[in-house]
Amino acid sequence: MLLALAAPAASQASSWATTSSNWGGYAVSKPGTRFGRVSATWVAPTVSCSSGGRRYSAVWLGLGGLHTTSQALEQVGTEADCAGGKALYSAWYELVPDAPVELKLTVRPGDTISASVTVSGHAVKLFIANRTRGTSFSTRLQADAVDVTSAEWIVEAPSACVDNGGCRTLPLADFGATSFAGVRATSATGHSGTISDPAWSAVAITLSPRRGPGSMRFATEAGSGTASPADLSPAGDAFTVTYQPAADGAPPPA
């Protein structure tokens, strides 16, 4: 799902911060830079469904979708949702604006997941592996539209969209914490680096349902929790995103 972005908390420089209604994590971009590959490893989180109701969370990496003008996004990841007090785990890929595709790849809490997205022209290669279980999925697709102006590593509150184009961000599931490691992006010219590489600018994104006037692309469910990225590791290739319950204590809608 594309980013629903608030105005940045600091001017865009080598490193800045912003708030989104649906993304939490890190992204990199730079005017004139095109990316060809993004990769990382993460640990599938344990979702807490004790409070009932439907909640959703996705962990993924991808290319594109960062900027509010973006019309495409190439991504692959895992899901940890709650329905009727039961935890549901899955893996998927999505080439926005097309709908997500669920994969026949078993995911359980604590599994180590590695993934990558590679784009050349309109050719997209998606790869995801469950290192704990020794299983993997890969595919090569032709996309009608691609966006390679950014690379990102994200925990997301997924959005529900209808045919007329209206979207709303769903309530975020309590995923506890998710840790990314081995984070790398590669430019279309072959330069490979971590999030803190000086070849591009890094943005730390906090997921929050709070909205300023006109600042968000999607409406947000009341009572949804937030998710904040911790500081990067010294090498700039690892970080953790942590869930926090809604400040008003309101439960998400059933």
Image (cartoon, grey):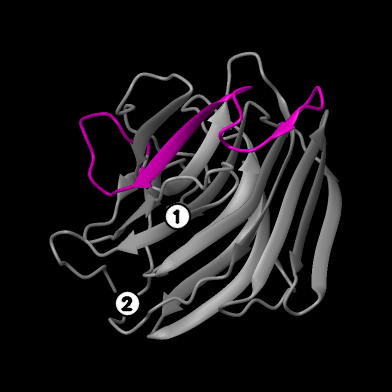
Q: Quadrant of residue 15?
A: top left
Circle 1 crowding by C-alpha within 10 Å: few under 14, some 14–19, many from 20: few
Q: Position of residue 198 (x, y in %)?
A: 59, 23
- Compared to 168, does 4 lie above or below? above
Whether residue 216 appears in magenta in the rendering, the answer is yes
- Mark 1 or 2, nearer chain start: 2
Q: Which residue is mark 2?
A: 53
Residue 28 located left or right of residue 135: left
Q: Residue at x 56, y 51 (%)?
A: 238
Q: Position of residue 68 (x, y in %)?
A: 46, 28
Q: Position of residue 113 (x, y in %)?
A: 68, 66
Q: Secondary structure at mark 2?
A: loop
Q: At label 2, which amino acid type do we have?
A: Gly
Residue 160, label in figure: 1
| Residue at the extreme front of the image, as rendered | 234
Q: Residue at x 45, y 55 (%)?
A: 160
Seen from the viewer's position, the closer of residues 52 and 62 is 62
Residue 191, label in figure: none
